[in-house]
Amino acid sequence: MSDALEGEAWVWVGDRFVPADVVAIQASKAAHLTPYLHTLPPDFQEFVPFMLELGVKQRFDARDYST
């Protein structure tokens, strides 16, 4: 199992770990996209520079909503 996850960035979103590329620091509150897209939990906002290094996005773009 650990071999399969090696090199992948995962982020805790409050109730599960998800790939970093489906997490954004800011997202529209009107859009409820769980389990597909997630907003970085408030507890992790102080780690924004680290999260960006992991692959978390500043905000989602049209491509994220269409795939």
Image (spheres, grey):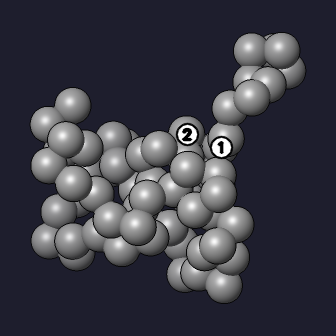
Q: Measuring 83% from the left and 15% from the top, which residue is drawn there?
A: 3
Q: Which residue is mark 2?
A: 19
The image shows residue 63, relative to residue 43, as above or below, that is: above
Residue 67 in percent (x, y) is at 21, 31
Q: Looking at the image, which is closer to me, 6 or 39?
A: 6
Q: Residue at x 79, y 25 (%)?
A: 6
Q: Give coordinates of residue 20: x percent, y percent.
A: 55, 47
Q: Disc number at residue 28?
A: none
Judge left or right: residue 54 versus residue 24.
Answer: right
Residue 50 left/right relative to 57: right
Answer left or right for 12 relative to 40.
right
Tags 1 and 2 in contact by the CB under 8 Å rule?
yes
Amino acid type, callout 1: Trp
* Kind of element beneath mark 2: strand
Quadrant location of residue 58? Answer: bottom left
First along the sequence among labels 1 and 2: 1
Residue at image location 64% in from the left, 73% down from the top: 49
Residue 18 lies, with reference to residue 6, above or below; the image says below
What is the number of the mark on residue 10?
1
The N terminus sits in image quarter: top right
Q: Classify residue 38 by image quadrant.
A: bottom left
Percent x, y for residue 44?
A: 64, 75
Query: Percent x, y for residue 54?
Result: 64, 52
